[in-house]
Image (cartoon, rainbow, N blue to C red):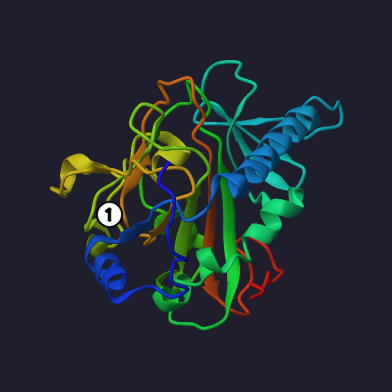
Amino acid sequence: MTMPTTMPSQRATAQEMEQYREEGFFVREAVFREEELQPLRDGVDEIHRRIVKAASDPDAEPARLVDGKRYQSLLGSSVQWEWREGADELRTMEPYHHLDARLDALIDDIRLWGPARDIVAAEELSLFSDKLNFKRPNGCPFPWHQDNPYWAFLCDHLDRLVSVGLALDDSNRANGCLWVIPGSHKQGALPCFEDRGVVGRLYTDLSQQGLGEPLALEVPAGSVMYFDGDIVHGSQTNRSSDHRRALLMTYQPAGLPRWQHEDVRPIVG
């Protein structure tokens, strides 16, 4: 794994800001060291165990089917189970930070939120949302989509958000790495499928867009990725025997409440 030789800048560089404006993303490779990542992986796996255990409780809220996929509210999080029939593995959940002190503290790491200040044009930040993607072996793909259409129902400051992803494992094509379409964010909200159910209406229909070529973000563990909410992105099936776990934090200017919540979670520098 590539190891950083110097401490990354606590601000976005001019080159990064230019790439963000033109392509809708930029990546910093191997920002976090292996000894920092392992406790975070342990925290993710512990959360998985707790959620699975909570789901087996007789008093747990029943899972609900949306477009044939299982969703469930457990331990204060909205959980989506893997798409395979009868799967007992998690696909994704949000929020997650309240379930593990290590993951909660990570949100305040300046290596994540420092550059975000320049993107949202605010010196002080708060958390908008946090999401955990598990992507275990045989984990299903995630169709092409944009984040902003998903958030638009309850957010009127989409232009003041930036999503930051931390790769907990090496990410490559075999284990279902993230793909993006550089420059697609310039198109704004794009047409989605109208005939694919409730959630399917949030998936981007690429056949009508004439967008550029997709790019696979193959990065070493510990890498940090910054994304515009309108960039088209997705992932493929994890065809390997390795995990591809990722933590996602979306930052916003200070004082604004979390998405779908009334509380403000300030970023502590």
Where residue 43 sits, quadrant-wise, is top right
- Screen quadrant of the N terminus: top left
Most foreground residue, 59 or 17: 17
Q: Left of 211 or right of it: where is 226?
A: right
The residue at 49%/82% (across/down) is 122
- Screen quadrant of the C terminus: bottom right
Most foreground residue, 265 or 77: 265
Q: Amino acid at mark 1?
A: Leu
The residue at 55%/35% (across/down) is 134
Q: Left of 206 or right of it: where is 92?
A: right
From the top left corner, tell me how far across and down residue 255 is, in percent: 63, 80
SS at mark 1 in the image: loop
User: From where the camera sits, is residue 112 visible?
Assistant: yes
Q: Is residue 224 above or below residue 55?
A: below
Mark 1, residue position = 190
User: From where the camera sits, is residue 157 visible?
Assistant: no
- Residue reaching furthest left? 210
